[in-house]
Image (cartoon, grey):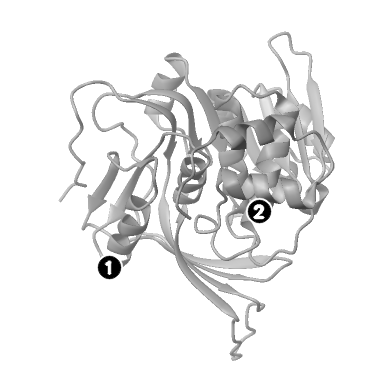
Amino acid sequence: MPPTVPASPGPVVETDVVFGGTVFCDLVLSGTPLPGPGEEVFADGFALVAGGTANRAVATARLGMRTGILAVLGTDVLGEHLHDLLAREPGLDLRWLQRTSRYRTPVTVAVTNEHDRGFITYLEDGAEVPRQWPGPLPVVKAAHTGIAFGVPGWIADLRRAGTTVFGGVGWDGSGLWSEEVLHRAEEVDVFVLNEVEALSYTRTDSVEAAAEVLTRHVRSVVITRGAEGVTAVDAGSAGVGSWVHVPAVPVRAVDPTGAGDVFTAGLMTGSVLGWDLRTRVAFAGLVATLSVRSLGGSASAPRPAEVAEFLASRRPEGDWTTVLDWAARQPATPS
């Protein structure tokens, strides 16, 4: 039985951001390391949330963007729970979220503490991002998909229509870190990855060297570095690079799960709003930082009011005028 595609209206849909990927059911356990063989450990917190591409979609919708998600979700009990959670998010359009009984909803168990986290994932074949767009393509300002295992055909269609395309990768469990990914990066406009991924794919030993290699394939590169902040470079149309380094905003971390996804949501939001590179990167780092203060990437993604309150109370270094002006214009949303 093929996935069920929700009915779409006749006219072409216009939206701000779309995400194509896999939705996971994240079971997050906090405050403990992974147990050793034969050991039992006890967590001090637990959350059951929508993960994977849902992290990015929920975080972007909470920042006020009209957001769509293209994914396949099981009709099992976990899939039903995730669908209910996502349907409660204002601004998140589920018309392209397909349902199927052919396989079970992917699951990730995350064991996390304030310093790091580990994951165990179950994923059946067929749960990855659909290769074809169901129905007419929407008019979209920015889109995101993973590029580790190929780029869906609809990405090229959106890009030709003027959409800014963001690409991401994840941990390579094979240890191969295939250089094919660098060639796939040529199919996107902005490549977002973390420091380990950047050094591994480029076979370099510094973030600067990795960025130099990556910008031979993609115009804009953003490398997250955890507590060291973010390094970004935009090669520009003439190939003249604009480099930015933004330090991390310090907070006490409860759960870093999904922080990279929330970062991407902030970066894409800043891009849609037309902010300069430094402001986009600083904002993305800020919302990612705010998300680690409680459990679950999507559940802890901040809203504009939370961003404004944190900036007013903590006053982190930097020029936050543009962000504060934006936050003040956003309508109040339920938390």
Residue 257 image-quadrant placement: bottom right
Q: Which residue is mark 1?
A: 77
> Please, what is the three-letter code of the amino acid marked with disc 2?
Leu
In the image: residue 138, left or right of residue 18: left
Mark 2 burial class by Cα count in 10 Å: few <14, some 14-19, many 20+: many
In the image: residue 169, left or right of residue 61: right
Looking at the picture, how far across and down is residue 40, in whole percent?
58, 90
Residue nearer the viewer, 38 or 69: 69
Is residue 58 placed above or below 137 in the rendered structure?
below
Label 1 SS: helix
Looking at the picture, how far across and down is residue 261, in whole percent?
57, 47
Q: Which circle marks residue 290 in the picture?
A: 2
Which circle, 2 or 1, is nearer the viewer? 2
In the image: residue 133, left or right of residue 160: left
Residue nearer the viewer, 120 or 278: 278
Q: Residue at x 27, y 61 (%)?
A: 80
> Please, what is the three-letter code of the amino acid marked with disc 1?
Val
Cα–Cα span, label 2 and label 1: 30 Å
Is residue 116 placed above or below 267 in the rendered structure?
below
Residue 39 image-quadrant placement: bottom right
**Nearest to N terminus: mark 2 or mark 1:** 1
Mark 1 burial class by Cα count in 10 Å: few <14, some 14-19, many 20+: few
User: Do the numbered discs 2 and 1 sit on residues whose CB atoms are within 8 Å?
Assistant: no
Q: Residue at x 79, y 21 (%)?
A: 242
Residue nearer the viewer, 50 or 188: 50
Res 280 visible: no
Label 2 SS: helix
Looking at the picture, how far across and down is residue 277, in whole percent?
71, 26
